[in-house]
Image: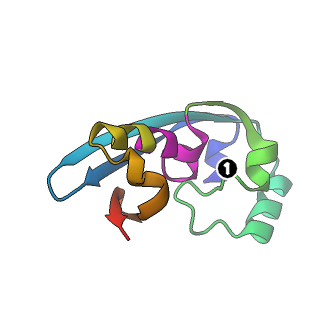
Amino acid sequence: MLTLLSGKKHKIITGVTIRTKDKELSFHDVTKVEFYELKSDEIEYYVKEYKPFDKAGSYGIQEWIGCIGIKNMEGDYYNVMGLPIHKLYRKSATIHLTHNFKYSWTINCHHFKCYLIKK
């Protein structure tokens, strides 16, 4: 997969649903990422040392390959990591969850749907 991404641009699209007892709000976020040309030894090193087998796109932007391999990015860094936290925070305000967000909510993600669940 990293060989296919090498030297190219790709999009990460994440869908989110916020659900409360009374309301539900869904949205998505798109981030465009461009990789430098990656050498085969760089890809082999990354796979051997970081074992990115649990990564949807075969890499973790917060890991070594993100530091040396990302040429350009348009959008939310956290979306690439798996959840567009900035947009989630702002969208939660539209259904009046922001005041509780930092204190009493946890985020559980399952199958591309993310739910805020009160602790």
Q: Where residue 30 sits in the image (x, y, percent)? A: 46, 35
Q: Is residue 51 left or right of residue 55?
A: right
List the residue tagged with mark 1: 61
Which image quadrant: the C terminus? bottom left
Residue 116 counted in the magenta span: no
Q: Position of residue 113 (x, y in %)?
A: 33, 57
The main secondary structure of the magenta stretch is helix
Q: Which residue is at 33% across, 65% downward?
A: 117
The residue lying at 50 percent from left, 40 percent from top is 86
Is any part of residue 38 visible from this angle? Answer: no
Residue 73 percent across, percent down from the top left: 64, 32
The image shows residue 71, relative to residue 102, as above or below, that is above
Q: Secondary structure at mark 1?
A: loop
Relative to residue 58, is residue 80 depicted above or below?
Answer: above
Q: How many numbered marks, from 0 up?
A: 1
Q: Nearer the viewer, residue 89 or 39?
A: 89
Q: Horizontal placement of 92 versus 25: left or right?
A: right
Q: Tell me where residue 9 appears, x and y as whole percent.
A: 60, 33
Please say which color scheme the image uses. rainbow
Over which residues does the magenta segment extend? 76-88
Q: Is residue 77 magenta?
A: yes
- The quadrant in which residue 63 appears is bottom right
At 41% from the left and 61% from the top, the residue drawn is 105
Graded by Cα atoms within 10 Å as few (under 14), some (14 to 19) or many (20 or more), the crowding at tag 1 reads many
Q: Quadrant of the N terminus?
A: bottom right
Q: Quadrant of residue 71?
A: top right
The amino acid type of the residue labelled 1 equals Ile
Q: Is residue 50 above or below residue 96?
A: below
Q: Can residue 51 be spotted in the picture?
A: yes
Q: Is residue 117 above or below residue 75?
A: below
